Image (cartoon, grey):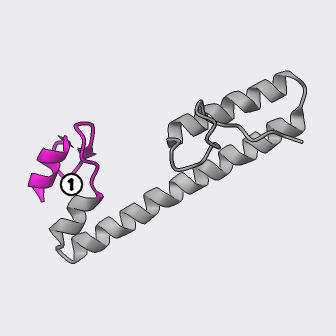
Amino acid sequence: PPSTPTSTNDTPIGSSSSTLEQTSQQLETAMYHASSLGDYTTAQTHKTSLDRLHMDDVGRVLQANSQFYQAFSNKDYNAMEELWLHDAVAVCVHPAREPLVGAGDILRSW
């Protein structure tokens, strides 16, 4: 039977303590390893897990977008602020404006 990939601290992949990127990398590594050994059933299991992970990620983005635009429609700045990534790498592009980079500039723009 296929084994369940774990993170470096033996936490099952996909658990809350594993980041999405780490989980994806671990699943890809396990998939390629199984494939290189000719264990295509296990490789397919890992591929299916990667597909689910991607769909879950897409769903979270869509949910966050929906929540943000609901807060925007309600002119609820606090709810909008809760949803923004509070990091220097955050980017926002308002119509007909240059991109804003960084949570501070983005939040001030609202």
Residue drawn at x 16%, y 67% is: 77
- Asked whether, in this view, residue 83 is left or right of residue 16, the answer is left
Residue 14, x across and y down, in percent: 60, 47
Residue drawn at x 23%, y 70% is: 72
Residue 101 higher or lower than 39, as above or below: below
| Residue with the most extreme top position | 36
Label 1 belongs to which residue?
A: 95
Residue 31 sits in quarter = top right
- Asked whether, in this view, residue 40 is left or right of residue 59, the answer is right
Residue 65 sits in quarter = bottom left
Q: Nearer the viewer, residue 27 or 95?
A: 27
**Boundaries of the magenta span:** 83-110
Classify the position of the C terminus by image quarter: bottom left
Residue 85, x across and y down, in percent: 28, 49
Residue 26 higher or lower than 76, as above or below: above
Residue drawn at x 18%, y 72% is: 76
Q: Secondary structure at mark 1?
A: loop
Residue 30, x across and y down, in percent: 73, 31
| Residue with the most extreme bottom position | 74
Residue 25, x across and y down, in percent: 60, 32
Residue 37 sits in quarter = top right
Residue drawn at x 24%, y 47% is: 86
Residue 2 higher or lower than 56, as above or below: above
Disc 1 residue type (three-letter):
Pro
Classify the position of the N terminus by image quarter: top right
